[in-house]
């Protein structure tokens, strides 16, 4: 089987027949053996309609789950039960135009690992959403792209319409919460190329939207879970947390040195900063970069001096931006904040590449190539 089209459904009795017909129509001139697999959690009579469809069309199959756990798990079950070498995932609400399937399939055959129809590249549109839904969607995408490194170059990282080669699913432990299965794939699967193509998101044809406050909360839990399960993202947040802890250690040490030991302000400041650096180094060495601890005594001996050098440069970056803000008659606190952000990014990157270099491990991933297509996508009038 060349292609499996996986469609999760929940109470979509009015849409499943329409979407099946449009998929069959869009693929009628394609030399392609395919299946349409519905993974259904419906509480209404949608399974009866799916049974009828499966009898009328040999391409249609369905799985009905009595106690399904949401759209994400439905897609994962579809991955496990489908047989196509290429897979396309789409919603059953007709907001994802089936007429785009031949182009997605063609791009997959050409060797691209992951195809994402995007509303946010030239030629795309999210006009099928009202103003409130657009704001919610923008907020969700922004949170995801800021929080997770592998999603930052993807314009439509929370979409439900995508195609992939089955090979990228091998060894991926997919365990989604809620409905954003694409995020799970972007973070956990191994792929080299992502191709975004434009499409227009259309208004719901029938049925009701499944968006709710519960799903929004599930989305945030999903983000947190992906961060914890992603080494490259978890390290950054641990590094920031340890940095915040170091500020507390610095201030407490300064208080003790000045008020109890009477060492003087300047001497106390220098010693307190050194104590904080040692504290940060030990936490980072045993937690943030635990997997990259140097085994040889010689290499470990040079790690702490490297960390100190990186930290001193970070202090210089903060001071420079604070002074620049002062020269420009900007608020000094703005400059200091900008300096802290820049220094944090510098410290993390420099320590990753130098102090705790992972070049000796097999864990570094190849950089993903993201291709953005601006080719016009011609859809039939029926799809509009």
Image (cartoon, rainbow, N blue to C red):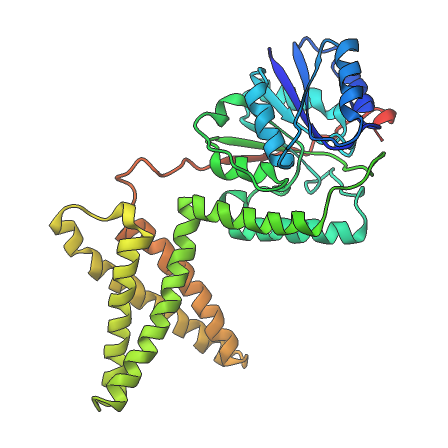
Q: Can you name the residue that lies furthest to the front here? A: 66
Query: 147 or 53, which lies in front?
Result: 53
Q: Residue at x 74, y 42 (%)?
A: 210
Q: Is there any visible trace of residue 270 in the rendered image?
A: yes
Residue 200, percent from left and from top: 77, 36
Q: Is there any visible trace of residue 115 in the rendered image?
A: no
Quarter of the figure that contains the C terminus: top right
On screen, residue 255 above or below 55: below
Q: Residue at x 54, y 81 (%)?
A: 329
Side (left or right) of 147 relative to 344: right
Q: Can you name the residue that lies furthest to the right here? A: 381
Query: 127 or 170, which lies in front?
Result: 170
On screen, residue 43 above or below 99: below
Side (left or right) of 90 relative to 360: right
Quarter of the figure that contains the N terminus: top right
On screen, residue 157 above or below 165: below
Q: Residue at x 62, y 52 (%)?
A: 217
Q: Residue at x 34, y 69 (%)?
A: 246
Side (left or right) of 381 relative to 330: right
Residue 366, percent from left and from top: 41, 35
On screen, residue 5 above or below 241: above
Quadrant of the rendered image containing residue 23: top right
Quadrant of the rendered image containing residue 122: top right
């Amino acid at each position: 089987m060349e292609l499996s089209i996986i469609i999760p459904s929940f109470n979509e009795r009015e849409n499943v027949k329409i979407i099946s017909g449009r998929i069959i129509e869009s693929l009628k001139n394609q030399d392609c053996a395919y299946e349409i697999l519905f993974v259904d959690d419906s509480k209404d009579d949608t399974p009866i309609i799916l049974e009828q469809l499966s009898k009328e069309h040999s391409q249609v199959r369905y799985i009905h789950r009595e106690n399904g756990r949401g759209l994400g798990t439905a897609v994962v079950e579809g991955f496990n039960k489908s047989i196509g070498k290429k897979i396309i995932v789409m919603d059953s609400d007709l907001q994802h135009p089936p007429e785009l399937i031949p182009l997605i399939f063609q791009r997959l055959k050409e060797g691209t690992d992951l195809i994402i129809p995007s509303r946010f590249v030239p030629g795309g549109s999210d006009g099928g959403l009202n103003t409130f839904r657009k704001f919610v969607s923008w907020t969700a995408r922004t949170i995801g792209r800021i929080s997770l490194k592998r999603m930052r170059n993807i314009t439509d990282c929370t979409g439900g319409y995508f195609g992939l080669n089955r090979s990228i699913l091998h060894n991926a432990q997919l365990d989604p919460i809620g409905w954003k299965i694409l995020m799970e794939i972007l973070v956990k699967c191994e792929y080299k190329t992502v191709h975004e193509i434009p499409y227009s998101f259309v208004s719901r044809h029938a049925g009701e939207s499944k968006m709710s406050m519960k799903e929004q909360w599930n989305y945030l839990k999903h983000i947190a879970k992906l961060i914890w399960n992603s080494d490259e993202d978890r390290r950054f947040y641990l590094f920031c947390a340890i940095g915040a802890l170091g500020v507390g250690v610095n201030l407490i040490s300064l208080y003790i040195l000045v008020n109890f030991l009477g060492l003087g302000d300047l001497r106390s400041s220098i010693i307190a900063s050194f104590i904080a650096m040692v504290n940060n180094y030990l936490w980072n060495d045993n937690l943030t970069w635990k997997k990259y601890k140097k085994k040889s005594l010689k290499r470990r001996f040079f790690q702490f001096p490297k960390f100190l050098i990186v930290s001193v440069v970070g202090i210089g970056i903060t001071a420079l931006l604070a002074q620049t803000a002062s020269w420009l008659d900007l608020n000094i606190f703005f400059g200091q904040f900008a300096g802290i952000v820049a220094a944090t990014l510098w410290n993390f990157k420099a320590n990753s590449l130098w102090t705790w270099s992972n070049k000796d491990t097999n864990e570094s991933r190849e950089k993903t190539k993201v291709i953005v297509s601006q080719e016009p996508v011609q859809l039939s009038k029926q799809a509009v």
